[in-house]
Image: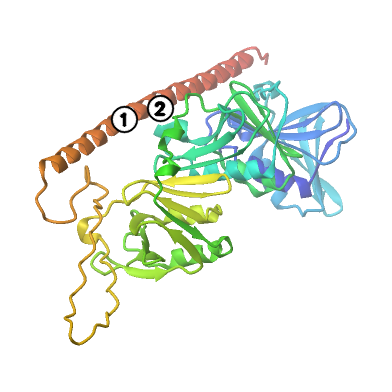
Amino acid sequence: MNPITLPMAELKPALAGLGKLINPRATLPVLHHVKVERTSDGWIALTGTDLDRFVTLRLEQPAEGPPMVVLIPYDQLMQLSKNCSKDERLLIETTDQGTVIRFAVANNLGASKVKPFPVDEFPQVPRIKTESVPLPPTVRESLHQALDCASTDETRYILNGAFIDASNPKAFNVVGTDGKHLYSANSFTLPIKLSVLIPSHKFLGWKEFNQDGEWQMKADNEHIQLSSRRWRFITRQIQGKYPDWRVTIPNPADDKTHITLDPSKLETLIKLVQRIPCHDPDRYQTIGLEWRDGQFLLLGKDSDNEPWLRIPVPDIQGNGPEMTIFLSRRFLIKAFGYGMNTISLVDSMHPLRFHAQGKQMIVMPLRMDPGQQPAPPPPAPVSMPPSRPVLPPAPPPQPMITNPTSEGPSPASNDPKNAVEEAIDMTLLIRDKLNEGFNLLRDLSVKLKTINRDQKASSREFNSVRSTLRSLQGLKL
């Protein structure tokens, strides 16, 4: 029988990709194996799985020989490939004594026996019967950016992925959020009718998969398939209703201040943001944005008791009332990295909106204690005639900025509040409490869905073990 030939130049990157899925701590032995297959057409494919996801690589060239399927431990293939150069190859063949992997040793062939494992134990790869949909490079880029903004909190499983919203057939959206910032991109359509929710996975960001040609997508009610020229990634969809993300988008008509940066300077600006002093690097990584006297400034400081350092940003265009707002620099760097060069602000308490060319990112601001508010810059000296007295300028009104852990806004001055202001504070407190309750109910729902999913996975593992035991009972010694 003709052996299956695995060239090292293709096997090594194949094992690197499969290793992003194969879990060395999996309880089922079959999940530690790679399925090596030669189809009836001669194509050779390698497949790995963790039960919920499947990754398959097809080698470049077909080979002669009858169909053949074997299971080989992933660790055995890794060990053999480490000792071989890229111009060598492995030969997999079946003998009367079992499967053997042959490799070059000087002028001879060495052999490594493969511990037999039933091929039927390998999980069935899902077959998605819908038509393939090409994903243009712009959509794939938006998909990566949405996955980068998705939540990693397992208790909020519905947010652990990128949502392709097909509810508006004329303008699709790719959305990702973790509750603190939200990314969305539109201006594209796909020939699909149902929205899909793609779970995050490190394989999707792997360089080899992203450089292997255009992506194609298939989807049904349960699974999603993303494939390139030689790679195929199949995963279960995240089940459940994605939150109504549109309600978190500020109305552009309410924006009052707009700052537009030079797109060619964004990379330099990212490096500047990274160098600005940060007084809380382990918590919020706070940075301030200030629009004052026709200048756009970045604010930072080394420690809480130091004054804010103001750094002007050149080559900007801005309009609107003066404003100071704080946010996490992680989100600022991310927005600039996505090419979003316009910042729209309502006030210091409303979310910031970064946007450019159909993409936008909504970021929740940080609330600062009144004592942490930056003092206004000293006014320029005023030249007056000697006969007239020089009066000091009146101090500008201080914005109401509260601590991130407070229940509502606190006054920037010590003046007593009137009844209307106290009533407004009470409504804000009630609103925050209601939002907290809704968030707890949503998290509980997601937690119950996660428990149900884990129970289904455990049931599948148990059924597989029971099937193995039944096959062992049928053996005759």
Of 264 and 44, nearer the camera is 264
Kind of residue at badge 1: Leu
Residue indicated by mark 2? 446
Of 166 and 206, nearer the camera is 166
Q: Position of residue 396 (x, y in %)?
A: 24, 63
For residue 174, what is the image quadrant?
top right
Above-or-below relation of 107 to 458: below
Above-or-below relation of 406 to 333: above
Q: Position of residue 77 (x, y in %)?
A: 69, 42
Few, some or many residues within 10 Å of mark 1 (<14, 14–19, 20+): few
Secondary element under disc 2, as helix, strand or loop, is: helix
For residue 153, what is the image quadrant?
top left
Left or right: 315 as drawn, with respect to 321: right
Of 175 and 474, nearer the camera is 175
Q: Gap between marks 2 and 1, in whole Å? A: 10 Å
Kind of residue at badge 2: Val
Q: Earlier in the sequence, mark 2 or mark 1?
A: 1
Q: Position of residue 230 (x, y in %)?
A: 76, 39
Residue indicated by mark 1? 440
